[in-house]
C-alpha cells in the first residue's frame, strides 16, 4: 500500500512538472509572437532614399479640397463659349431678332424682364432681369449695333457678374441659298461668387445651347419655318 502511495506521489509530481513545462512553453511562444509583432523590420526601400517614390492619393471627400476648389483666389473663374453655325434665315432677319431686346422677356430662357431705356444710331442701353428665384440678376446692358452684321451686349452694372459679354456676328451663309446666314456666337462671363461659378461650370453648355436655340425658334415664329436645318460647324468651351 505504501509503495502504491509513493508511486502516485511520484506520478503527481511528474504531472505537475509536465504541466509547468507546457505552461512555460506556452509563455515562451506568446512572448515570441508578441516580440515579432512589436519588432519592426526596416524595409529595404527606406534605406535607399534615392529610390523612394511618393504616390499622391486623394480621399473620396475632403472638405479642405473642396474649400480650395471654391476659393476665390484659385485661378480664373471666367467661362467662355463660342460656336459657328449655319442658319436658315437671312442676316437681316437674325439681326432683327437679336437686336430686339424689348422682346427678350417673351422667349429668352430665364429672362424675366427686358426693356430698352435709351437708343441712338449704333448704340442702345437696356435693363434686364434674368435668373430664377433666389438667383435673380438685374443689370444694364450696353449694346453695340451694326445692322445686319453685329449685336454686342456688355453688362455694365451687375451684382452677380464681374463681367458678362455676348457677341452675335452674322455673315453670308450657303452660296447657293440667299436665305441662309452664318452665325458666329461668343459669350464670356465671370461670376463674382465662386459658388455661382461652380454651378455655372456644371450647367453652362446646356444653358448656352438652349439660349441660342431660343433665338432660332423666335426667328421661326416671326419669319416662318425654314427648310434649312440649323447646322453647327464648330464650337468650343473654355
Image (spheres, rainbow, N blue to C red):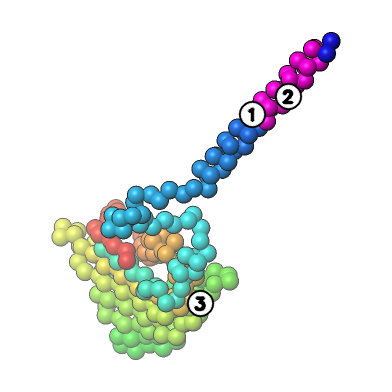
Question: Is 195 in front, or is 35?
Answer: 35
Quadrant containing the C terminus in the rendered view? bottom left
Q: Is residue 16 left or right of residue 215?
A: right
Residue 203: x and y in percent read 44, 61
Secondary structure character of the magenta stretch overall:
helix
**In which quarter of the view is residue 147 placed?**
bottom left
Residue 211: x and y in percent read 40, 64
Q: Is residue 6 magenta?
A: yes
Q: Taking the image as drawn, is residue 72 in sight?
A: yes
Task: Say what secondary structure mark 2 lies in.
Answer: helix
Task: Say what secondary structure mark 3 lies in.
Answer: strand
Q: Residue at the front extreme? A: 2
Residue in the picture at 38% in, 57% down: 56
Q: Point out the tag, 3 or 1, that comes first from the N-terminus.
A: 1
Q: Which residue is mark 2?
A: 13
Q: Taking the image as drawn, is residue 85 in sight?
A: no
Q: Point out the tag, 3 or 2, that comes first from the N-terminus.
A: 2
> Can you say whether 114 is above or below 28 in the image?
below
Q: Which residue is mark 3?
A: 137
Quadrant containing the N terminus in the rendered view? top right
Question: Is 176 in front, or is 238?
Answer: 238
> Can you say whether 162 is above or below 207 in the image?
below
Question: Is 42 in front, or is 1?
Answer: 1
**How many residues crowd mark 1 within 10 Å: few (<14), some (14–19), many (20+)?**
few
Q: Is residue 66 magenta?
A: no
Q: Residue at the top extreme? A: 1
Q: Which residue is mark 1?
A: 22
> Can you say whether 196 is above or below 117 in the image?
above
Residue span colored magenta:
3-21
Amino acid at each position: 500500500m505504501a509503495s502504491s502511495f509513493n508511486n502516485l506521489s511520484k506520478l503527481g509530481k511528474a504531472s505537475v512538472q509536465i504541466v509547468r513545462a507546457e505552461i512555460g512553453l506556452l509563455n515562451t511562444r506568446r512572448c515570441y509572437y508578441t516580440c515579432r509583432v512589436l519588432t519592426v523590420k526596416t524595409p529595404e526601400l527606406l534605406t535607399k532614399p534615392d529610390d523612394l517614390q511618393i504616390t499622391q492619393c486623394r480621399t473620396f471627400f475632403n472638405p479642405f479640397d473642396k474649400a480650395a476648389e471654391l476659393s476665390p483666389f484659385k485661378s480664373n473663374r471666367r467661362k467662355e463659349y463660342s460656336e459657328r453655325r449655319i442658319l436658315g434665315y437671312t442676316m437681316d432677319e437674325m439681326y432683327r431678332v437679336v437686336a430686339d431686346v424689348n422682346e427678350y422677356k417673351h422667349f429668352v430662357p430665364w429672362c424675366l424682364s427686358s426693356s430698352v431705356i435709351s437708343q441712338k444710331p449704333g448704340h442702345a442701353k437696356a435693363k434686364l432681369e434674368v435668373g430664377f428665384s433666389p438667383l435673380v440678376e438685374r443689370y444694364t446692358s450696353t449694346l453695340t449695333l451694326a445692322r445686319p452684321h453685329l449685336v454686342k451686349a456688355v453688362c455694365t452694372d451687375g451684382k452677380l457678374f464681374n463681367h458678362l459679354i455676348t457677341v452675335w456676328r452674322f455673315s453670308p451663309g450657303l452660296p447657293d441659298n440667299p436665305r441662309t446666314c452664318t452665325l458666329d456666337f461668343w459669350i464670356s462671363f465671370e461670376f463674382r461668387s465662386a459658388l455661382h461659378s461652380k454651378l455655372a461650370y456644371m450647367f453652362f453648355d446646356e444653358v448656352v445651347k438652349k439660349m441660342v436655340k431660343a433665338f432660332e425658334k423666335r426667328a421661326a415664329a416671326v419669319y416662318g419655318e425654314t427648310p434649312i436645318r440649323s447646322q453647327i460647324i464648330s464650337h468650343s468651351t473654355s
